[in-house]
Amino acid sequence: MSSFISHTSVDCRDAYVLSKFWEQVLGYRELPDDPNLPGHEECLIRDPETGHQVLFLEVPEAKSVKNRLHFDLRPRSGTRDQELARLLEIGAVEVADHRGIHGPGTGWVVLADPEGNEFCILRSEAEIPAE
C-alpha cells in the first residue's frame, strides 16, 4: 500500500494574492467551477497539463523561518536567465545567486514570492548537457 500527493499546500497571509502570483509563475489555472476571489481563505490552482494542484491556505501567523520544503522550477521554454528576468518582473525577489557554482552554465537562483517563501529557478532541460 502507498499514498500519493493530492496537492501541495502553502500557508500564507493572503491566499488570493499568492495564488495569482503563482498562477503567473507556473502557468497553472484556478478551477472553473471554484474560482479564486479576494477574501477567500483557500485558493486552489491546477496545472492544466499534469493536474498537479497547489492550495494556498490563510493562516494567522507570518512566515518566520526558512522553508523546510520548497519548489525547484525549470523553465518550460527559454533559459533559466530569461525565466529569472520574467519572475523578477512579476514580483519575485532574488535571495541568493548560485549560478556558476559548479562551473560556467551551472547553478540556480533562489527567489522568494511576495510572502517570502523561497523557491529556486534551475536551468531549463535544454541547457543541461547530455550525459
Image (spheres, helix red, strand yellow):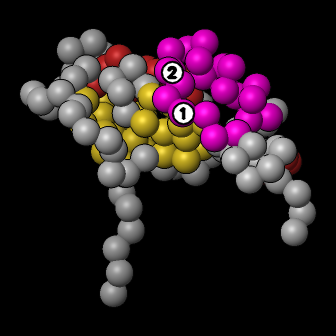
Q: Is residue 74 magenta?
A: no
Q: Amino acid at mark 1?
A: Ala
Q: Quadrant of the N terminus?
A: bottom left
Q: Could you give the CA–CA distance between mark 2 and mark 1, rounded to whole angstroms? A: 12 Å
Answer left or right for 97 relative to 43.
right
Task: Spot the residue most to the bottom.
Answer: 1
On the image, numbered disc 1 is attached to which residue? 96
**In the rendered image of this protein, does residue 125 appear above or below residue 35?**
below
Q: Is residue 48 visible?
A: no
Q: Which residues are magenta?
A: 79-99
Counting the numbered discs, the total is 2
> Any magenta on residue 95?
yes
Q: Which residue is mark 2?
A: 92
Answer above or below: position of 76 versus 93. below
Considering every residue shown, the one lying at the far right of the view is: 130
Q: Residue at x 23, y 32 (%)?
A: 63
